[in-house]
Amino acid sequence: MHTRTNHVVNKFFFRHDFNHTFELKTAMTTIDEYLDSALLKLPHASDRQLCRELGLGLGTVSQWRTKRSWPSDKVIVQIAHLAGINELQALIDLNIWRTNGDIQQKYVLLDEKLKSQVNRNTAA
């Protein structure tokens, strides 16, 4: 089990079709929270160290924090893995962050439906 930070408080569990158990968190809602959580897992934690760990240019994390760019799908999965965050939730969150308008609303709806399904499955 991964160590959790205090700001990650709400957890839901659900069964995936391949009988793997995943954890979904509702508390992490910004790229900064993902990055900070990943940094907690690294020795000598810094944005530069995170860039090195992910094999990226040294200013990349700074660009994400200032919303000038977003990580790729592959990289958000790496960050999620480092941070102990469900990869599927990270992909949904990434698409919420980097889209807008009607498309963003569709991702928000998808996120809400997934969490609603998880709540029903855990209540049963």
Image (cartoon, helix red, strand yellow):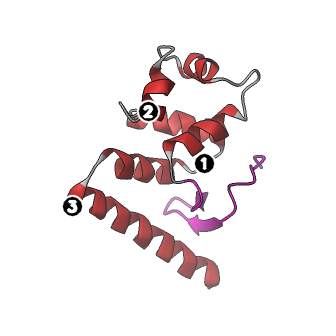
Q: CA distance from mark 1 to mark 3?
A: 26 Å
User: In the picture, residue 106 is in which quadrant?
Assistant: bottom left
Give the residue type that dot 2 points to.
Answer: Thr
Reading the chain from its start, which is encountered first: label 1 or label 2? 2
Circle 1 is placed at which residue position? 85
Give the residue type that dot 1 points to.
Answer: Ile
Reading the chain from its start, which is encountered first: label 1 or label 3? 1
- The total of numbered circles placed on residues is 3
Left or right of 39? Residue 115 is left
Residue at 44%, 32% in the rendered image? 64
Q: CA distance from mark 3 to mark 2?
A: 23 Å
Disc ID at residue 102: 3
Residue at 47%, 14% in the rendered image? 57
Residue 62 in the image: x percent, y percent?
A: 49, 25
Mark nearest the camera among 3 and 2 is 2
Task: Give the structural element (helix, strand or loop) at label 3.
Answer: helix
Left or right of 118? Residue 113 is left
Q: Residues within 10 Å of mark 3 (few under 14, many from 20)?
A: few
Task: Give the structural element (helix, strand or loop) at label 1.
Answer: loop
Circle 2 is placed at which residue position? 66
Residue 62 in magenta stretch:
no
Residue at 33%, 44% in the rendered image? 98
Looking at the picture, tell me which residue is in the foreground, 8 or 18: 8
